[in-house]
Amino acid sequence: MATSRLVGFLESRKNLTGSACGIAGLALTFAGVAGPYWPVVVAGLYGAGALIAPPERPALPDFPDPSAQLEELRADFGTLRTYLDGVELPPAAAGRLTELTEVLAALLDPGWVAEVLAQDPEGVRALSRAVRQDIPEAVDTFVRTRWWTRLTPGTEPPERHLERQLGLLHEESERLAAALRETEARRQESHTRYLEDRGRSQ
C-alpha cells in the first residue's frame, strides 16, 4: 500500500512539475547564479513547481458502452420472454403483448438497427425500462389482481388495465422505432447534400 502511494506520488503532476523546476534550479547553480544558497533555490523552485502544477484528475468511472448494455439487455429480454411464456393471459392482452414483444425483438436484433440504437442513450434507457421494469410489473400486477378479483366479483376486470398498459408500451416502442428511422433518414439526406455540394464545388 505504501509502495503504491509512493509510486503514485512519483508519477504525479506535482512531483513531475516540481522536479522539472528543481532541475532548472540545479542548472542555475551550475551556471553560478544560485551561489552558496543553491539548496534553498532548488528546494524553493521544486516547491513552487509543485504548487503551480494542475491538480490530479481522477479517472472517469468505467461504465459499459451502449453496445455492451444492449448485449445485457438482449439477455434480459430472453429471460423476460421465458417468464411471459409461463403466464396465461386473456386473448386480447396476449395479442397486445405479442405486438409489443415483436417490436422490442426487432429493435434488439443484432445488426444495423441495434447499431443506430446504441447511438441513442435515451432510447437504450427507454428500452431497458420497458424490458426490465414496465412489462414484468404490468404482467405481475395483472396476475396478482386477477386472483383478488375472483374473491370480489363485480369489480373492474384487471385485463382492461393490462391491455391499456401494454398498448401504451407498444406506442412508446413504436415512437422509438420511428425516431431511429428518422435518424437514418436524416443521415441519408445529409449524405445527399454532401454529394450535391461536392459536385458543385468541382
Image (tube, rainbow, N blue to C red):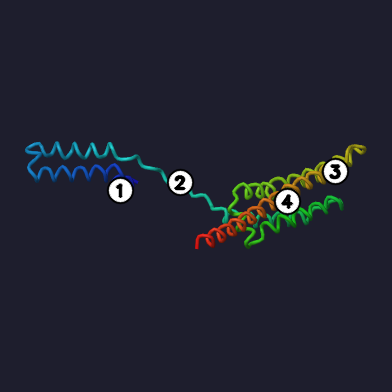
- Quick one: label 3, few (<14), some, or many (20+) residues within 10 Å? some
Residue 174 circle label: 4
**Nearer to the camera, 15 or 120:** 120
How far apart are the two marked residues, 2 and 4, measured between alpha carbons?
Answer: 35 Å
For label 2, the crowd category at 10 Å Cα-Cα, with few meaning under 14, some 14 to 19 and many 20 or more, is few
Q: What x and y, as percent, mark residue 173? A: 71, 50
Residue 70: x and y, percent? Answer: 61, 55
Q: Position of residue 53 (x, y in %)?
A: 30, 40
Label 2: which secondary element = loop
Please indicate whether residue 1 sits to the left or right of residue 68 in the image.
left
Q: Disc 2 designates what residue?
A: 60
Q: CA distance from mark 1 to mark 3?
A: 65 Å
Using the image, determine if residue 70 lies above or below residue 36: below
Nearer to us: label 4 or label 3:
4
> In the rendered image, which residue does mark 1 sit on?
11
Cβ atoms under marks 4 and 3 closer than 8 Å: no
Which amino acid is tagged 2?
Leu
Q: Residue at x 59, y 48 (%)?
A: 121
Q: Amino acid at mark 1?
A: Glu
Do labels 1 and 4 touch, CB within 8 Å?
A: no
Q: Residue at x 89, y 37 (%)?
A: 155
Which residue has dot 3 on it?
Answer: 160
* Secondary structure found at label 3: helix
Q: Label 3 is placed on what type of residue?
A: Arg
Q: Earlier in the sequence, mark 2 or mark 3?
A: 2
Where residue 202 appears, as percent x and y from the top left, is 50, 63
Q: Nearer the viewer, mark 2 or mark 4?
A: 4
For marks 2 and 1, the one nearer the N-term is 1
